[in-house]
Image (spheres, rainbow, N blue to C red):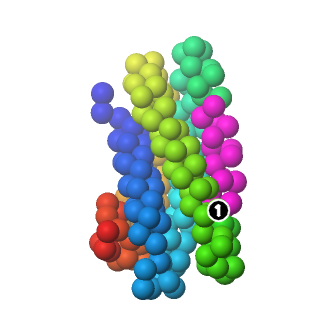
Amino acid sequence: MNHKSIQIINQEHATISAMLYSIEMMERRGPKGNRPLFFEVLRAMLFYIDEFPEKQHHPKENLYLFPPVLKKAPELRETIEQLELDHKVGEYRIRELQHLLLRWEILGDDCEAEFRSAAKKYYDFYLHHLQLENSLIIPKALKVLDDEEWSLMDEAFEDNSDPWLSHSVDSVYQNLFSKITNHAPAPIGLGDS
Ligand SMILES: [Fe+2]
Ligand SMILES: [Fe+2]
């Protein structure tokens, strides 16, 4: 079945994965000859994760996806509790990462290793989270949700303003969108890899 909400969740998961991958590429590449641009773009990418997945994607999963799946498939309770906990700590972890990037930028390269180590843990944490949702929650939702649950979920997920999905030029996030697409490495941007 082709539910709009599932298409949007899949697109959002793909965007988050691409953003994480580009952040990792960028971090591996390091500041090279343009230190200010390196920090500006990396900061914009971390801000994107804080602004969209954390504030829009996760709350909708908590409200519209997890409860009906849990009601019909109680065997997934442990997994769903873990995913909800990830959503809770994820917000703290992305802020922490932004802070560690600022420390590196402002206090200097003695703080680089601390950022790199936290960033690696963050990618692993997030990719594991997405993998659990993709492999266990979404397939189960497709089997057990009823029409009313689908219409609530479709309505909630269609109401999104992620610039990567809407590509709206009027968006207040246009500067953020342009900065990342023009300078970040593939797959999210057009900058050097
Ligand atoms: Fe999630
Ligand atoms: Fe998700």
Q: Is residue 94 magenta?
A: yes
Image spot of residue 1 (x, y percent): 30, 27
Query: Taking 87 as reference, is 91 above or below it?
Result: below
Q: Residue 139 location in percent, x, y?
A: 40, 25
Residue at (57% x, 30% y) in the render = 66
Q: Which residues are magenta?
A: 82-98
Give the labeled residue for mark 1.
114
> Number of marks in the image?
1
Q: Quadrant of residue 15?
A: bottom left
Does residue 166 appear in this view? no
Residue flagged by tag 1: what amino acid is it?
Answer: Glu
- Name the secondary structure under disc 1: helix
Q: Main secondary structure of the magenta part?
A: helix
* Residue 48 among magenta residues: no
**Residue lying at 59% horizontally and 15% vertically, measured from the top left:** 74
Quarter holding the C terminus is bottom left
Q: Residue at x 40, y 62 (%)?
A: 25
Q: Nearer the viewer, residue 82 or 67?
A: 82
Q: Can see residue 14? A: yes
